[in-house]
Amino acid sequence: MIEFKNVTKSYPNGVHALNRISLEIEDGEFIYIIGPTGSGKSTIIKILNGEEVPDSGLVMVDNVDVGSLKHRKVPQYRRNIGCVFQDYRLLPALTVQENIAFALEVLGLPKKMIRKRVQEVLELVDLKEKARAYPDELSGGQQQRVTIGRAIANRPKILIADEPTGNLDPEKSREIIALLEKINAMGTTVVMVTHDIVLVNEFKKRTITLDQGFVVKDSKKGGYVSV
Amino acid sequence: MRRHFALTFSSVLSIAIALLISMLMLVLAWNVSSFTTNIEEELIVQVSLNPTLDAAGQDELEKEIKEIKGISSVRFSDKEAELEQLIEDYGDTFSQYEGEDRNPLYDVFIVELEDPTQIDAITSQISKMDGVIEATYGTDTVNTMVQLFSSVRIGGLVFVAALICLAIFLIRNTIKLAIQVRKDEIQIMRQVGAMNWYITVPFVLEGLLTGFFGALIPSLICVFGYTALYQALNGVFISELFVLKSPYPFLLYVCGVLFLIGILAGMFGSYLASRKYLRWTR
């Protein structure tokens, strides 16, 4: 479970990214966080990720107080959280399967286990026939699927997706959402930041709308309504 | 390392140059230090005694001189022995002074010192004592030389220390660049939860290798160059006074120092660079 209690965060340049935000996200939920640029969406992700520390308030993820996590404990914490970004962030010199394996090698898992898990993941993201291809030989949608595969390879409890469809056409975006739904159905909590209103209206889920650091709407039934 | 060969090569080269200069300074300082020891061994103060001084006064004076700090030995030599030494050193022209009452020399104390840099002070102290006509030592040139060598030695060490700092700085910069090149990789590692040491260790190893190869080049130059020089000069520099150190085991020490500096500077520089990067964010 993810819990934000009165979380405030401002940056040294004076921007108040989050103002007394309170949120609860249950295990196994799939939620959208939407809002215009500068509304604090990215800051929520950075705090969940352990990159930023809230100025005040409490952020609990699976009973871990993320804000007061010690520097050297952050890596361990991060293993429970998969991240997907708009710009894919794949290593160009590695093939698809190597990119996925890389995330597991870094954790020091045994080779045999890695090989098995990579096959599973490739099947899940439907890229088995592209296993030996390099990222620049893939389309944007395929690259994003690799990134998702890498993010979930370690079976994290939470998957954070920051504008995963930002660079994709509607057709490919639907594929990505379908994949995220598939992952969600397997028990992973999915938090997806987006400003693709078409998608939000088509695949209705709980939708949290942010504006200027405030939660302006938290709709359980989903869909975008102008405020 | 393979992926950014040019970068690694340039850092190896810059470290090699820094260590090469360090090596030259080390060889120089070490040799100068042994020159100084050679010369210092010959540094003695000659104290001429007043002929009117009786045996009791002489004992008194000897005791007094021995009490000065930094004196290693005091030896008495009468004027006949001194004349014989003179004749032996400079030839028979001085034989005319042999015989009763014709010897113009004085009885002397030969004073040897522990610390040659004190020679000036000790000499003037002795010359003020009762029963002493004069106290002299070698020549001004010898004295200047000792001073010069000691400053060369100290200067050399300071220079080497500065170059070590330079080497650390160079390695740190190279690794910083290497980290920039591999920023994406590191970011992904951090994202999937790699421990900080997991990210740091490869860079430290890279720094170690860089330092090792950086030390290899000047070490080879040093081994072959110094041996060749030693043989060409027959083991002495200009005169017999300046005996070069024999290549073995001296060169082993120099190379050992070079590798130690290279490897430690390499590891330390990489550690600094990668630590700094990892501390940017949580």
Image (cartoon, helix red, strand yellow):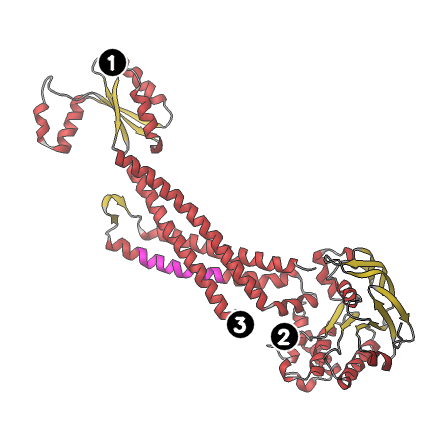
Which residue is tagged 2? A91
User: Disc 3 versus disc 1: distance between alpha carbons?
Assistant: 85 Å
Give the letter of the chain under mark 3: B
Within the image, what quadrant is residue A82 found in?
Answer: bottom right
Q: Amino acid at mark 1?
A: Ala
Residue A204: mark: none
Please tell me in which quadrant of the rendered image residue B177 appears.
bottom right
- In the displayed structure, B250 sits above or below B180; it is above
Q: Can you say which quadrant of the picture contains the C terminus of chain A?
A: bottom right
Magenta range? B210-226
Residue identified by numbered label 1: B55
Q: Is residue B30 above or below residue A162?
A: above
To which residue does mark 3 refer?
Answer: B3
- Indicate which label's residue lies in the foreground, 1 or 2: 2
Tell me if mark 3 has few (under 14), some (14-19) or many (20+) residues whose alpha carbon lies within 10 angstroms of its own: few
Does the segment drawn in magenta span residue B146? no
Amino acid identity at mark 3: Arg
Q: Secondary structure at mark 2?
A: loop
The Cα atoms of the two marked residues, 3 and 2, are separated by 13 Å
Q: Residue A110: horizontal and vertical position, in percent?
A: 66, 71
Q: Residue at x 31, y 22 (%)?
A: B126
| Number of the front mark, 3 or 1 | 3
**SS under mark 1:** helix
Give the chain of mark 2. A
Amino acid bearing label 2: Leu
Q: Is residue B54 left or right of residue B15?
A: left
For marks 3 and 1, the one nearer the N-term is 3
Measured as percent of width and height from the top left, residue A158 is found at 79, 69
In the image, taking residue B30 as reference, residue B192 lies left or right, namely: right
Q: Looking at the rendering, in which quadrant would you find the N terminus of chain A?
A: bottom right
